[in-house]
Image: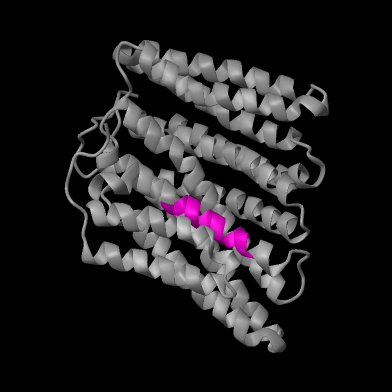
Amino acid sequence: MRPRDPHEPGRVASTLELFFDLVFVVAVSVAAAQLHHALTEDHIAHGVMSFLIVFFAIWWAWMNFTWFATSFATDDWLYRVLTIVQMGGVLVLAAGIERVFADEDFRVVVVGYVVMRVAMIAQWLRASRSAPETRRTTLTYAGGIAIVQVLWIGLMFLPHEVTLIGWLVLVVAEVSVPVVAERRGEQTTPRHPHHITERYGLFTLILLGESLLASANAIIEAVHEHEELAPLIGISALTLIVTAALWWIYFWPPHHNAITSLGSSLRYGYVHYFVFAAAGAFSAGVEVQIDVITHHSKLSEFVASFTMTVPIAIFVLGIWWIALRANADRVVNVVVPVGAVLVLFDPIIPVPFIVTTVLMVAIVATLVIRPPITVGGGE
């Protein structure tokens, strides 16, 4: 398990990595569905907090495997088996998501999460034996992850009242491990910019696929709700347009330019939590809007509109910050963030989602007219 060449030509996602992503389709779908139900029942604060908690577990496990794979991926039998073990942990985690939303019971999620992370410890230990030049870095990863997993298990036995505080502390501990490991070691782990950004792009497509599913659900509902046929078809069409706009915006800049140093790599990786969570929440917002149209939601139309506009704005602002702004001219760097902020105010307008769609199309039109400039990006 030698370090991979960060300049390896033709490096693309492997079939194992694509197979690995499939279980995250399940986890993201379950999390979005539970967020949708919580929002529809007007449990907004609880639903959003629960979603952010479980989505962190999903995102962090995926991200750690992805960055490890770009540095040390090999295709022997043990690497494959350990990856499949991580997949099993994701499925266990997905099975426990409903309990988090319903009863604030994190035990199953924590068990699934720890299974994933223990497999990751084994991968880092393997790398430490095969790569002496990064031995200190890889052992720090393994030791740091192991310590935090013991604390996660201990969190399950603490009183319910301190669970949220404990979760916040351990999240900080988790995201600190890569920072400490990379800065403490004599040599950082190699990062292949094209490979890592391709992996992020593929995960983005998975999340946007959830929104397309929500668009299809609107059509399905329209078949049964003849009285609301026009609004449902309208929300389906507008969802497709906005989802396409999000895809267009995300893939407009050359993302590999955003990974030029350790600091820029950490920013790219960590800010994606908000981008990914927003994409997952957008699909839930579409489902909420369908419920409002069919009179199955406790939310008012005004409040329900925010379940769609807030995720859109966060997604666009996140991508602008980490990848787009360094490759854009002054016009684009004004239109994109201003357009995203205007989306937040759309619910005060009688036809909010139509205005949101127009704004998103306007952003895309600006990107078409003014192509990206080729610069180094990063820090």
Q: Residue at x 51, y 70 (%)?
A: 239
Up/down of 197 relative to 354, above or below: above
Is 191 situated left or right of 62 in this image? left
Task: Where is residue 202? Give x, y as percent.
Answer: 40, 51
Is 270 situated left or right of 227 in this image? left
Q: Residue at x 59, y 66 (%)?
A: 348
Q: Quadrant of residue 136?
A: top left
Q: Residue at x 58, y 54 (%)?
A: 281
**Residue 13 visible:** no
Quadrant into which the N terminus falls = top left
Quadrant into which the C terminus falls = top left
Foreground residue among 222 and 146: 222
Q: Quadrant of residue 152?
A: top right
Up/down of 248 relative to 173, above or below: below
Magenta stretch, overall SS: helix
Task: Where is residue 327? Give x, y as percent.
Answer: 24, 48
Task: Where is residue 36? Give x, y as percent.
Answer: 68, 58
Is 79 situated left or right of 71 in this image? right
What segment carries the magenta color? 305-316
**Residue 341 visible:** yes
